[in-house]
Image: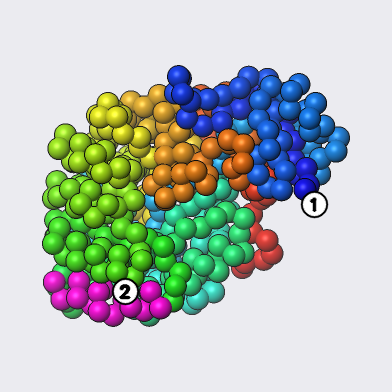
Amino acid sequence: MTELTTVVYDASEIVVGPGESETLERHADAALAVVDGRVAAVGPTDAVTDEYPPGTATHAIDADGRSVIPGFVDSHTHGLFAGDRSDEFAAKLRGKEYQEILAEGGGILRTVRAVREASDERLRSNLLGHLDTMLAHGTTTVEVKSGYGLDAETECRMLDAIRRADEAHPVDVVPTFMGAHAVPDGTDAEAYTERVIDEQLPAVADQGIAEFCDVFCEEDVFSVAQSRRVLEAGMEYGLTPKVHAEEFVRLGGAGLAADVDAASADHLLHANDEDRAALVEAGVTPVLLPGTAFSLGADYADARAFLDEGGSVAVATDFNPNCHSGSMGFAIALACVGMGMTPAEALLAGTHGGARALNRAGRGGTLREGMPADVAIVDAPSHVHVPYNFGVNTVETVLKNGEPVSGTEGNHE
Ligand code: NIG
Ligand code: FE
């Protein structure tokens, strides 16, 4: 039996997704009806409510003066971690380099120590807390990477915590294995690459949780050749590649991503024209992470050059202990102010672009009829207010599959 779950009506604006003639397909004075968790109709309020009267819906939401947008798809986070690295933020402000901190055993390696010491329950509850914040800021799907275990047992524990948090929380969590995130103490990149391939990947494949395999292809971390070996081994187990590419230097990760047909190449602060052309040609989604550049005090990725190349980009938070914000609204504001994207381009990059980076285009990231009704209702009259109100959460209500949601089901303390 079909159920009219929710009708949102009288919205100032509903953003549907990418438009054909203009950047955005959107309706003014609009309504949206949800049947069985999916968008059944979207358009002018009169037309939608004639067919789907709010009075017969389980939830009728008067969105007068508000705008309605697709829930954010945050396609790059390291949102499961333990410990506190706020002192490194302060040290970086005094001029210390990110890679210097890592070379001294801080940074990622410090979080690895904290994660190895944390109980399974602590890992799960830390992630649930972060998911609550993300949901309150309008995120309905988020990718979360492992990569703070750096051994088979802890990488699998992280992926298991990600799976259990996904089951307990309304936000959809997409799991990525990232054993090749840093080289642990007591070994070198070459020997550790073999361990990722021979010990971690078989265990992760056996566990059956991870969907993607990511590597930190970077000077003094993993070379292009080592990254390629990890990604190709992951592909043998059915894991789709992703690459942290050209973040601190231009090493060749973007070319590698194009070569192995990765779902995305991420960061790209130092990508050049050749890299951009290769990614667009191969259909790899560039994931731009302006929060990382902001928190490192680095130059932003050249979003305009990607858009001019004809590619569609994703914008994500990169939420992690080095970039401590899970707010997609803030990432979108930075995409506008720091990378020169229009509010419409940035909003699409944080919704439809994110879905593309997670191989979910056609399954999410828009409010087209038939799509899951993952919706953020913004307490402002247009989508432009999302970046315009930087540093302020404009999201008032979130629907997941048409149901109003907030936070974890049950106690996760
Ligand atoms: O995407 N660049 C590598 N990994 C993360 C940082 C992780 C951390 O510092 O804990 C990133 O920015
Ligand atoms: Fe990252």
**Compared with residue 205, is residue 273 higher up or lower down, i.e. above or below?**
above
- Gap in angstroms between the C-alphas marked 1 and 2: 43 Å
Task: Assign ligand 2 to one image quadrant.
Answer: bottom left
Judged left or right of residue 1, residue 330 is left
Question: Of callouts 1 and 2, which one flags the residue occurring earlier in the amino acid sequence?
Answer: 1
User: Where residue 275 sits in the image (x, y, percent)?
Assistant: 18, 40
Q: Report which quarter residue 172 is drawn in.
A: bottom right
Q: Report which quarter residue 339 is drawn in.
A: top left
Mark 1 lies on residue = 1
User: Where residue 36 sits in the image (x, y, percent)?
Assistant: 71, 48
What are the residue bounds of the magenta stretch? 190-206
Amino acid carrying mark 2 in the image: Leu
Mark 2 lies on residue = 201
Classify 10 Å Cα crowding around label 2: few (below 14), some (14-19), many (20 and above).
many
Instruction: Out of 80 and 44, give the one closest to the viewer.
Output: 44
Q: Is residue 250 magenta?
A: no
Judged left or right of residue 107, residue 328 is right
Amino acid carrying mark 1 in the image: Met
